Image: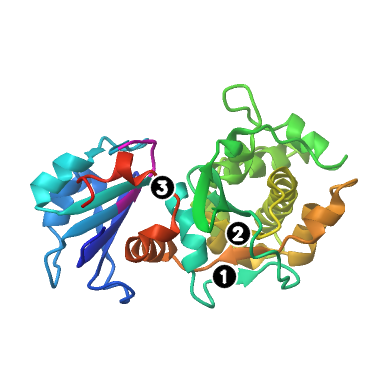
């Protein structure tokens, strides 16, 4: 279905990453990065790559909604049209995926050591639903289930669910929290910009002026002063994330486990208290047993989604996708 050499691409609002896979099951080639703003479209970015062989197929994921053979990036002007890309690049085949759809589909292909357990290393149910929570500029959530022996990703907008204070200590923080579109959602608290909102709210609740730090400034100050207010905000963010992840685990009955991913969590991993994370994750009476049985882990591999797309192209029959509606060329 997908001829090799295969190019895999992960396209964000700011940067795109590419790697060539020369044969099914072969390792990724060197990852090359391009700034999205430097090119009018994906085809031009691909043509700028220094590749050892000409790709015959492309599997790409992007931060935006997919409709059949097209994808519109949410935070960049690129609009990807599969058949047009195939013509421009001389490709025999191609596929577009949403970024969280692709990352969820990558979970079965992760190599050993790609994740680190958060708390006790639990076995989980290998046949049960798995859940992916990714924090970056936004907060994405997707589930992965097995359907008649094939993997299927279930996208969601769970990042836009309301999130409430967990106890009396958090109530004043929520009262001081900046609303986004009139709401306090998981994304508005836990995504990159949300960490700044959380810190400002914690400072206001303590009777201090909001410092208005950027996420990068907040993290830098926390790293420099591990006992300071900024570091405590990042510890609080992990506790809130644990509680939110537990809510989603019982919503999906994610007995296969919950994986925390995205650009933000690895950068603030030094402030993760695994015991506190699991305490919030498991405090789900009267169904706490379901949460306690679900393993939790942190994704460490930055190239996980590229590995996953390469695995999908090598064994497409293992994935429950509507290939007839989504492949750029009619499959032979």
Residue contact at pointers 1 and 2, CB within 8 angstroms: yes
User: Which residue in the protein does label 2 denote?
Assistant: 259
| Residue at the farthest top position | 182
Q: Earlier in the sequence, mark 1 or mark 2?
A: 1
User: Residue 141 versus residue 147: which sits nearer the camera?
Assistant: 147
Q: Residue 49's image quarter?
A: bottom left
Relative side of 126 to 37, left or right: right
Element at badge 2?
strand
User: Which residue in the protein does label 3 denote?
Assistant: 321
Cα distance, mark 1 to mark 2? Answer: 8 Å
- Residue 146: image location, x then y, percent: 56, 55
> Magenta stretch: residue 114 in it?
no
Can residue 36 be seen in this snapshot? yes
Element at badge 1?
strand
Residue contact at pointers 1 and 3, CB within 8 angstroms: no
Numbered tag placed on residue 115 in the rendering? 1
Q: Few, some or many C-alpha atoms within 10 Å of disc 2 (few <14, some 14-19, many ≥20)?
A: many
Q: Residue 186's image quarter?
A: top right
**Residue visible at 73% across and 64% down?**
273
Cα distance, mark 1 to mark 3? Answer: 26 Å
């Amino acid at each position: 279905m997908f001829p090799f050499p295969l190019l895999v691409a992960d396209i964000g609002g700011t940067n795109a990453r590419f790697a060539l896979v020369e044969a099914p099951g072969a390792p990724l080639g060197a990852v090359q990065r391009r700034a999205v703003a430097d090119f009018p479209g994906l085809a031009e970015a691909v043509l700028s790559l220094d590749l050892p062989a000409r790709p015959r197929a492309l599997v790409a994921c992007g931060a935006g909604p997919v409709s059949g053979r097209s994808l519109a990036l949410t935070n960049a002007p690129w609009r990807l049209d599969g058949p047009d890309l195939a013509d421009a690049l001389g490709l025999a085949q191609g596929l577009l995926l949403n970024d969280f759809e692709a990352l969820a589909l990558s979970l079965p292909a992760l190599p050993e050591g790609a994740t680190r357990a958060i708390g006790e290393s639990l076995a989980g149910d290998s046949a049960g639903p798995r859940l992916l929570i990714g924090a970056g500029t936004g907060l994405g959530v997707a589930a992965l289930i097995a359907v008649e022996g094939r993997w299927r990703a279930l996208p969601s907008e769970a990042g836009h669910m309301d999130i409430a204070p967990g106890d009396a200590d958090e109530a004043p923080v929520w009262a001081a929290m900046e609303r986004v579109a009139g709401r306090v959602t998981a994304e508005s608290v836990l995504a990159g910009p949300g960490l700044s909102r959380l810190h400002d709210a914690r400072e206001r609740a303590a009777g201090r002026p909001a410092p208005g730090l950027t996420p990068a400034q907040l993290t830098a100050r926390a790293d420099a002063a591990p006992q300071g207010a900024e570091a405590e905000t990042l510890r609080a963010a992990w506790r809130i994330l644990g509680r939110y992840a537990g809510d989603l685990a019982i919503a999906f009955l994610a007995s296969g486990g919950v994986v925390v991913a995205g650009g933000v969590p690895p950068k603030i991993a030094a402030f993760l208290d695994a015991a506190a994370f699991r305490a919030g994750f498991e405090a789900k009476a009267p169904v706490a047993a379901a949460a306690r049985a679900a393993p939790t882990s942190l994704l460490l591999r930055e190239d996980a989604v590229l590995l996953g797309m390469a695995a999908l192209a090598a064994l497409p029959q293992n994935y429950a996708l509507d290939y007839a509606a989504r492949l750029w060329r009619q499959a032979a």
